[in-house]
Amino acid sequence: MKSDKKELYALILDVLPITAGDPRRPQFRKEPIVQAVGTEQFKLLELVPKVTDVQVNDKVYIGDKARDKIEKVKRRIGYADLTQTAKLELPYAVERIVTENEERFVDFFNKAVPITSKQHMLHLLPGVGKKILWEILEAREKQPFTSFADIAERVKSVPKPEQMVIKRVMEELEDPNVKYHIFTLK
């Protein structure tokens, strides 16, 4: 599972020029808002931009020092707080994060362990039952996986391992009742 460290980078999901926010707040006090997803722990965030040229799909630095496009991280939000545009963009952002960090997710296939005596971390991936679980475990025992293509080649019943990861991340983000979080921080 993940530790609660701060996200350093985020992908922009939606840009809202002026927030609706509190209707009692004067217009000049309202600020633009950016909805984004963190690239490490998939935290859903509301950001306040410094500049007006932030675009959907931009990767922005949100760490503590020398932010170029982001003024501050306003707050962490849930899936239900996302705008419709952000909800539509989220699967593409998750896919980009997974494909750009292939080594990290292939490492999951190599190092996943049992959670309980009857359930393995790999069981949490969509489509993985006992048969596929054993195929993955036997293949990685012979030699650790090196890429998504390597997993697909050696475990024939897993033609698109990256899609399994993407679907699991989306499930963890969309459903607040998911018990085990293997890629996101609850």
Image (cartoon, rainbow, N blue to C red):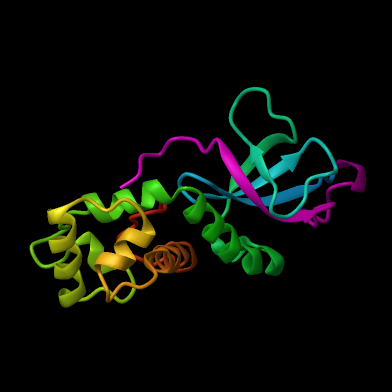
Vertical position of residue 54 compared to residue 70: above or below: below
Residue placed farthest to the left in the image?
A: 117
Exactly how many numbered labels are in the figure? 0
Q: Main secondary structure of the magenta part?
A: loop
Residue 168 higher or lower than 67, as above or below: below
Q: Residue 145 placed where, x, y %? A: 27, 53
Magenta range: 1-29
User: Is residue 179 shown to the viewer in this render?
Assistant: no
Using the rendered view, name the quadrant where residue 75 is placed. Answer: top right
Picture layout, residue 68 above or below residue 185: above
Left or right for 58, reference 158: right
Where is residue 143 shown, x and y percent of the image?
Answer: 18, 52
Q: Residue furthest right?
A: 28
Q: In the figure, is residue 144 to the left or right of 15?
A: left
Task: Examine the rendering and report whether any part of residue 186 can be seen.
Answer: yes
Q: Position of residue 70 (x, y in %)?
A: 72, 36
Q: Residue at x 43, y 51 (%)?
A: 102
Residue 144 placement, left or right of 134: right
Residue 156 is situated, as x and y percent measured from the top left of the image, at 27, 74
Residue 27 highlighted magenta (yes or no): yes
Q: Residue at x 8, y 62 (%)?
A: 117
Q: Residue at x 26, y 73 (%)?
A: 128
Q: Is residue 51 magenta?
A: no
Q: Foreground residue, 106 or 119? A: 106
Q: Which residue is located at x 52 percent, y 52 percent? A: 97
Tell whether 136 sits left or right of 60. Answer: left
Q: Quadrant of residue 13?
A: bottom right
